[in-house]
Amino acid sequence: MHPINKQVVGQDRIETSVSLEKRSVQKIQRARKLLYLNLVIYTIISIMEITVGQQTHSVALLSDGENNFTGIISALLLIVGLGFSKMPRDKFHLEGHWQYESLAVFLAGLMMLLVGVDCIWNGWLHLIMIIHGHGQPVSRNAVYFALLSGLTMLGEYIVNKVIGKKMMSSSLLAAAKDYLSDSATSFGTMFAIFVAVIFKIRWFDTVSALLLEGFIIYNGSQIISTSASKLSNGFDPVIRAKIRANMMSNERIAKVCFIDSRYSGDNMIIDAQIEVAGEMTVTESHQLCKDVKEHLQAEFPVLYCCLETIPGKQPTCTSRSSLLK
């Protein structure tokens, strides 16, 4: 049984799941603690790589350090976004502020993409300098720092991925994807520097940096795509089909006319129309809606569900059904 929070804001009233709201706030608080740890690690690694990259004249290590610097910005954005998302509802946000999390994830992905583009530009300029006989050879000390960075980022990826999946937190999963790209970048940087030092191929360090930044841009665009889909009310049709099957498991429902679903942060908002027996009373219809909501909330993170019942033996459920079915 999921308790319902009936909150009145001015003349508007909306009913949401109290238990889901509490779990969401607790999830946000745990996620923020891990993001603070991410922030500290990113700061240390970034400062080390940028400093050593300048001393060893490694473009790849410098690019990796600049990429990890974006992790600092991303962690800050996610921390701030999660802080806003747990704010109580007001008259402008009747469903709550959960979308701030999706907005923070979107901005973090955008930051990854923009910094990747900037690093590619700087790497291209450095490659032109090498072609014209400028630049200095790379020191092998850069290899060790790239290896240290790669191992650290790989460990953080595993932690964020496991906890993010367990909590179903889009923020931690985005951070995990960021760490995965950073880990791959650091190991790629280590290999590039090793080849450049051992075989005296000066341009290999820079070319590898360009390729790795392309990988970062790809990951950033993936994060942007996922979060933008949520912000634009996109919803996976596979999950919508599961929601429909969940509703149809109730024998009192003759037909699900349409389901309109969207996300509010990591929580779902469902608007649906169901066809019931024509002789069903208003009281029975109301009880059916409560039962359907509770059954949905037992399987999905449904924050708010609005159900409309219509009597059976109608020529069509609604004109919207043909569009949203």
Image (cartoon, rainbow, N blue to C red):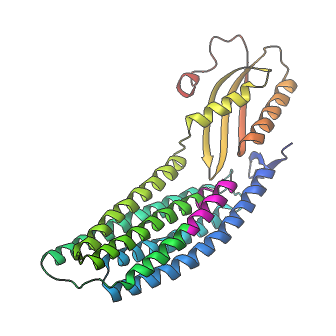
Q: Name the magenta segment's main secondary structure.
A: helix
Q: Which is more toward the observer, 71 or 102?
A: 71
Rendering quarter of residue 191:
bottom left
- Residue 293 lies, with reference to residue 317, above or below; the image says below
Q: Is 101 placed left or right of 67 in the picture?
A: right
Q: Name the spot of residue 91 as percent of width and height, x first.
A: 68, 55
- The structure residue drawn at horizontal position 85% and vertical position 20%, both measured from the top left corner, is 281
Rendering quarter of residue 123:
bottom left
- Residue 206 lies, with reference to residue 18, above or below; the image says below
- The structure residue drawn at horizontal position 66% and vertical position 65%, both measured from the top left corner, is 31
- Residue 188 lies, with reference to residue 304, above or below; the image says below
Q: Is 13 placed left or right of 216 in the picture?
A: right
In which quadrant is the C terminus drawn? Answer: top right
Which region of the structure is painted magenta? 155-172
In the image as oriented, which residue stretches furthest toward the left?
A: 132
Residue 170 magenta-drawn? yes
Res 91 seen here: no
- The structure residue drawn at horizontal position 32% and vertical position 69%, both measured from the top left corner, is 209
Residue 100 magenta-drawn? no
- Residue 131 lies, with reference to residue 12, above or below; the image says below
- The structure residue drawn at horizontal position 18% and vertical position 77%, both measured from the top left corner, is 130
In which quadrant is the N terminus drawn? Answer: top right
Res 99 seen here: yes
Q: Is 35 placed left or right of 110 in the picture?
A: right
Rendering quarter of residue 163:
bottom right
Q: In this figure, what is the number of numbered marks?
A: 0
Q: Name the spot of residue 121 as percent of width and height, x first.
A: 27, 69
Q: Name the spot of residue 216 as percent of width and height, x first.
A: 40, 62
Q: Name the spot of residue 145 as percent of width and height, x first.
A: 44, 81
